[in-house]
Image: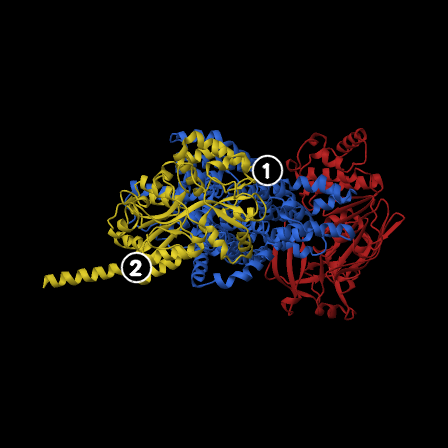
Chain colours: A yellow, B red, C blue
């Protein structure tokens, strides 16, 4: 009799539990995510509550909230921030067969505290007919005077640039990185302003000829409502630079389970879902990112941009060198 | 010499004043009397050239300007505003100097000192306006207005902010000033006591018109209508029953009045027995509210008596000299 | 009567402490040792922050005083073509938040923006052949902020001129001076306190701004705070920067108070007469019209038209169920906050009225300083405050959702920021109620509370309404604080507009922006009507 009661209690509890929720702190600001969350809700019945803000703000918030933090999952658009979150002891290790089997080890934390979900490359976008195609080669070379007045790149405040710099430091050391930054600043067509798409629009219309941008933005411009974006992107092409002793700079968008997550099980389910085939395909087709799941193909458009080799350094270094990167930017005068 | 001819003015389609005519000679003090808001300040402003859109014309000396003509810049007018309008960001001597813009520096200083002396404000010359008392501020305002030796002096409620002591002092030297420089002075006020005591001529403004304009004595003796009479002195309106009892002949347009001071009580029996309704002691006299016996309360009027003791058994009768009864228009 | 420990006083003291807590915490960080990062900051960036902030302060001060005073002068003293319209129309830029103005102008002057394309077509040239004014610069930021903020100066000057200057202007005329001389010698000098008061408000807003500076890439203290805190992860550095910023602002406020005290520019005020407006004709009429039309055009009409175009092409896609929820949430948050803050302000000012001692007015001054603290800084302070509260005080929060699950933190933040506005309104309202009313009530032995309800409340209707509306608009427009402190699934129109802009969907961002602006316009109209009644 007692056993029956206990059993029904458990069933009741778990059914209550099943119709519960997962609280996501996300820096991702893409509309495709909305669709993903709906898919997850339909599939599992777990409601997704989202707070969107810059990753750094989210991390600060989780720190302040401490053990009372209602966050279950932290999603960032940059590896450096994931690293930071782990450093501040805001994430916990999880045991997920699915994740450890399907996500390559280079794209997850060795302690299983975070997992990459998508990849993006930071590349050179040049105006067709500007003669840049023959000149572009490595990231280091961008500081060369032959690019004087040609480079359009966004502010150093942005995390994507900071991670690129972190990678430059990892490959060549701080001294070199500083000289490199100074060289790039000397080559800038205009003082840094606006976002990646602004840089692309600029070079498309004759201001400078090489823009530094993330790959998925190009995809978004191709199918954009705004005619000016569509027109601009037709005038440019992507070039995949490399590091002298490495590959193309890769950054990841990833997720981790919060240390004090109140809905831990749901959190794990959520991340596993984000790494599932359906979700990965949506990332690929809907947001023009490169999936991490083996066997999921990029969209045709993305594939048309060409192949590249991923850079060799560990994703962790992007976070480790972030502070130094910001310092070097300041010293080199890269606003 | 100021001459106002056929002056009228409207705001937003409504006529405020019409058919205003009067003259002010050099050395004359004229007061425009009327209730607050009747438009008397507007006439003053028009003479000063501050009110541009009006009907009729205004002549200052030999020059006449109507509002359609080009605004004449140099009216030699001194204007003293009700709130003095002294510039708060300048001290006393700078306020006065403000009027002397066209003079050279040396002449300016000389003239300013003259005025400071004349109006007894030398010791205040460096003070800020808000540090002065009301009377002192007025003197500064007058000094500033007189700085350019205007022929015409316009004053808006000059006695309004002063206590009794200051009032008579101000009256005195204002009169002296005007006579000394032979100015045409026009005052505007709703305070009849001051008007009567300082003016050569008075104009009463009521119901959009200039009801009467004449010397003070004349207006006092022969007010053209009840409003004026009531405005100037304390009068009683004789009730109909009294008129009948006295056999006075008046028509519908007229009423019979008598000054309160002319009425008195008597114990000597006559036709006019009174009922005393109320007695108040006012220091100088007793104020009694009375009515004729058998009449209603509406016909009550007032009497002043130097001495009075209310003895219930006495009957009182009205003593009213018929020759002092004035019949005037309503 | 000794009322030192009345309930009113105690609650005022308590509230003051509560409201100052975030600022105090930030200041405390100043004394917690400096990181080696601070050295780096000092060497590379501090000078730039100071220089830029000063540049912005001076630029905004100059522009807003010129635009604000000129328009106030013209509309107060003269009638000219459309002057009646400009009377109210010049306030409209208030309805547009600074960052939205920045988005719109940024979009118009973008490489492929409407203005750029228009000019290029007109001149039939290429992008490289024409030098365009780079709007996304510090100069551009100054211009945009001035266009949005000049109404502060305009309103204060206009109120002053309309109510205090009629007879002084008449007096100047009797001395046969030209209008230009009167302006230079009389009107400008007496308007100085009003101009300074308006400029102070405008400059404070400009210096605390985040949206415009961030979008245009201008480094100021506020962007530096965000960067140090979020980017470098150093709360200490961020707090130090915040303290320096607040010191600047504090000095500004003190200077303004001092210069106001030295000049007593109140006229007797007994005989209020409206100014006799002079009708302008000919070229003067045209000039006056242009002088007023330009700020109206650039500060409201042009951006609004552009917004309408963008709105027309994107509203169908953006206005979905989620958006309507968003709208509902924004409105309820703003209405609720405005109500709470108005009520609290009333309490403070009433306390000062009843307990006429100095400490009460000091409390009020302290609370008013909250206005000068940038929204982001307030948010940091509140987060830290709640964290400390939780750690050292009793375990108040049984659930984990005190910040993330409720609106308590965010409303707290609005209180800190906006109490000053409501208090100012009530101070003005109370000052019009003669103290004889209080005495009369005392004689009739009506208690404080009843006096409040029966005597003061009806007389303060206008002030309460004005305060409510202004706070309502401010909450709807507020961005940085809301971004940081909002709970789950709780977005506002402002946040959504920013999000869309960050996703480079400027055109789509016009939808939430349009709602913000329309709500702002309606509120401004209500406010103007209310001012007329007073």
Task: Identify the subunit bearing mark 1.
Answer: C
Foreground pick, A126 / A333: A126
The residue sitting at 20% across, 62% down in the picture is A12
Label count reads 2
Observer-side mark, 1 or 2, equals: 2
The circle drawn on residue C277 is none
Foreground pick, A27 / A308: A308
Under tag 1, what secondary structure?
helix
Is residue C446 in sight in this rendering? no
From the viewer's perspective, tell me whether residue C121 is left or right of residue B146.
left
Q: Which quadrant holds the N terminus of chain A?
A: bottom left
- Residue found farthest to the front: A134
Under tag 2, what secondary structure?
loop
Please name the residue that numbered disc 1 is placed on: C58
Task: Identify the subunit bearing mark 2.
Answer: A
Q: Percent x, y for residue A51? A: 38, 52
Q: Percent x, y for residue A276? A: 31, 56
C81 over C218 or under it: above or below = below
Crowding at dot 2, Cα within 10 Å, few <14 / some 14-19 / many 20+, comes out as many
Q: Percent x, y for residue A41? A: 33, 60
Please name the residue that numbered disc 2 is placed on: A46
Q: Percent x, y for residue B49? A: 79, 49
- Residue found farthest to the left: A1
């Amino acid at each position: 009799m007692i056993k029956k009661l206990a059993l029904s209690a458990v069933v009741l509890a778990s059914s209550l539990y099943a119709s519960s929720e997962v609280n996501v702190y996300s820096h991702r600001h893409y509309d495709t995510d909305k669709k993903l969350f709906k898919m997850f809700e339909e599939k599992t019945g777990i409601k997704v509550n989202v707070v969107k803000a810059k990753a750094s703000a989210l991390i600060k918030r989780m720190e302040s909230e401490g053990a009372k933090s209602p966050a279950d999952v932290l999603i960032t658009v940059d590896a450096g921030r994931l690293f930071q979150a782990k450093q501040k002891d805001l994430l916990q290790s999880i045991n997920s067969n699915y994740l450890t089997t399907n996500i390559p080890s280079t794209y997850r934390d060795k302690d299983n505290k975070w997992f990459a979900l998508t990849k993006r490359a930071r590349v050179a976008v040049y105006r067709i007919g500007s003669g840049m195609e023959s000149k572009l080669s490595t990231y280091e070379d961008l500081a060369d005077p032959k690019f004087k007045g040609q480079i359009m790149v966004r502010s150093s405040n942005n995390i994507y640039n900071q991670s690129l710099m972190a990678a430059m430091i990892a490959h060549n050391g701080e001294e070199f990185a500083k000289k490199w930054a100074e060289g790039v600043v000397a080559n800038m067509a205009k003082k840094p302003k606006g976002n990646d798409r602004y840089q692309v629009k600029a070079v498309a219309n004759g201001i400078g000829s090489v823009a530094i941008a993330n790959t998925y933005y190009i995809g978004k411009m191709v199918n954009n409502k705004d005619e000016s974006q569509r027109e601009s992107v037709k005038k440019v092409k992507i070039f995949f630079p490399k590091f002298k002793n490495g590959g193309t700079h890769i950054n990841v968008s990833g997720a981790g389970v919060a240390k004090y997550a109140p809905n831990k099980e749901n959190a794990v389910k959520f991340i596993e879902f984000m790494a599932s085939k359906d979700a990965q395909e949506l990332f690929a087709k809907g947001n023009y990112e490169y999936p991490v799941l083996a066997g999921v193909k990029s969209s045709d458009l993305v594939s048309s941009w060409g192949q590249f080799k991923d850079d060799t350094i560990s994703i962790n270094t992007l976070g480790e060198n972030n502070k130094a990167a910001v310092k070097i930017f300041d010293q080199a005068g890269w606003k | 010499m100021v001459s106002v001819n056929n002056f009228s003015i409207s705001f937003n389609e409504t006529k405020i004043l019409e058919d205003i005519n009067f003259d002010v000679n050099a050395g004359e003090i004229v007061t425009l009397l009327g209730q607050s808001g009747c438009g008397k300040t507007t006439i003053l402003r028009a003479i000063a050239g501050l009110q541009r859109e009006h009907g009729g014309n205004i002549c200052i000396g030999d020059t006449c300007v109507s509002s359609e003509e080009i605004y004449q810049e140099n009216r030699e007018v001194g204007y003293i505003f009700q709130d003095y309008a002294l510039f708060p960001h300048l001290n006393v001597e700078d306020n006065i100097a403000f009027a002397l813009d066209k003079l050279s520096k040396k002449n300016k200083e000389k003239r300013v000192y003259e005025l400071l002396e004349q109006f007894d404000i030398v010791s205040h010359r460096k003070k800020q306006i808000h540090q002065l008392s009301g009377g002192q501020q007025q003197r500064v305002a007058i000094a500033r207005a007189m700085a350019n030796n205007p022929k015409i002096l316009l004053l808006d409620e000059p006695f309004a902010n002063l206590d009794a002591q200051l009032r008579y002092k101000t009256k005195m030297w204002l009169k002296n000033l005007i006579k000394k420089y032979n100015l045409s002075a026009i005052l505007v006020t709703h305070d009849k006591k001051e008007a009567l005591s300082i003016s050569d001529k008075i104009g009463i403004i009521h119901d959009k018109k200039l009801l009467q304009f004449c010397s003070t004595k004349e207006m006092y003796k022969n007010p053209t209508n009840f409003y004026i009479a009531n405005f100037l002195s304390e009068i009683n309106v004789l009730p109909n029953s009294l008129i009948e009892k006295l056999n006075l002949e008046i028509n519908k347009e007229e009423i019979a009045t008598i000054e309160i001071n002319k009425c008195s009580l008597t114990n000597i029996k006559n036709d006019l027995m009174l009922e005393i309704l109320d007695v108040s002691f006012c220091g100088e006299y007793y104020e009694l509210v009375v009515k004729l016996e058998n009449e209603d309360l509406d016909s009550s009027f007032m009497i002043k008596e130097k001495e009075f003791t209310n003895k219930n058994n006495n009957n009182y009768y009205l003593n009213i000299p018929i020759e002092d009864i004035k019949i005037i228009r309503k | 009567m000794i009322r030192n420990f009345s309930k009113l006083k105690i609650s005022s003291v308590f509230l003051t402490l509560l409201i100052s807590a975030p600022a105090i915490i930030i200041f405390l960080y100043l004394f917690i040792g400096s990181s080696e990062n601070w050295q780096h900051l000092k060497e590379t960036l501090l000078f730039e922050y100071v220089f830029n902030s000063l540049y912005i302060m001076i630029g905004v001060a100059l522009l807003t005083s010129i635009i604000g005073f000129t328009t106030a002068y013209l509309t107060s003293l003269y009638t000219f073509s459309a002057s009646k319209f400009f009377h109210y129309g010049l306030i409209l830029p208030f309805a547009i938040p600074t960052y939205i103005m920045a988005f719109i102008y940024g979009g118009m002057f973008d490489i492929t923006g409407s203005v750029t394309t228009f000019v290029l077509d007109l001149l039939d040239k290429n992008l490289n052949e024409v030098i365009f004014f780079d709007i996304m610069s510090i100069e551009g930021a100054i211009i945009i902020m001035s266009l949005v903020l000049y109404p502060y100066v305009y309103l204060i000057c206009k109120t002053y001129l309309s109510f205090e200057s009629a007879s002084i202007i008449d007096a100047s005329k009797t001395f046969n001076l030209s209008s230009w001389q009167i302006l230079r010698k009389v009107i400008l000098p007496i308007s100085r306190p009003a101009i300074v008061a308006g400029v102070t408000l405008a400059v404070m807003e400009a210096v605390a701004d985040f949206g415009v500076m961030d979008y245009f890439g201008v480094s100021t203290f506020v962007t530096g705070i965000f960067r140090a805190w979020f980017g470098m992860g150093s709360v200490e550095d961020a707090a130090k920067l915040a303290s320096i910023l607040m010191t600047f602002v504090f000095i500004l406020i003190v200077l303004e108070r001092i210069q106001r005290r030295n000049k007593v520019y109140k006229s007797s005020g007994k005989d209020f007469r409206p100014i006799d407006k002079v009708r302008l004709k000919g070229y003067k009429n045209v000039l006056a019209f242009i002088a007023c039309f330009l700020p109206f055009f650039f500060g409201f009409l042009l951006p609004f038209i552009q917004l309408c175009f963008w709105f027309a092409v994107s509203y169908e896609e953006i206005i979905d169920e989620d958006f309507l929820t968003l709208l509902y949430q924004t409105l309820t948050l703003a209405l609720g906050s405005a109500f709470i803050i108005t009520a609290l302000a009333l309490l403070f000012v009433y306390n000062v009225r009843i307990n006429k001692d100095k400490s009460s007015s000091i409390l009020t001054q302290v609370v008013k300083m909250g206005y000068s603290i940038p929204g982001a800084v307030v948010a940091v302070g509140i987060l830290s405050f709640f964290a400390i509260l939780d750690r050292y005080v009793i375990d108040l929060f049984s659930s984990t959702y005190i910040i993330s699950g409720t609106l308590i933190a965010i409303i707290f933040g609005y209180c800190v920021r906006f109490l000053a506005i409501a208090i100012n309104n009530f101070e003005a309202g109370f000052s019009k109620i003669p103290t004889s009313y209080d005495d009369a009530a005392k004689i009739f032995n009506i208690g404080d509370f009843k006096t409040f309800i029966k005597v003061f409340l009806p007389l303060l209707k206008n002030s309460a309404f004005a305060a409510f509306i202004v706070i309502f608009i401010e909450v709807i427009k507020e961005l940085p604080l809301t971004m940081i402190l909002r709970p789950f699934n709780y977005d506002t129109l402002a946040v959504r507009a920013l999000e869309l802009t960050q996703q480079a969907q400027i055109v789509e961002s016009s939808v939430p922006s349009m709602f913000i602006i329309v709500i702002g316009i309606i509120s401004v109209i209500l406010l103007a009507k209310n001012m007329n009644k007073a």
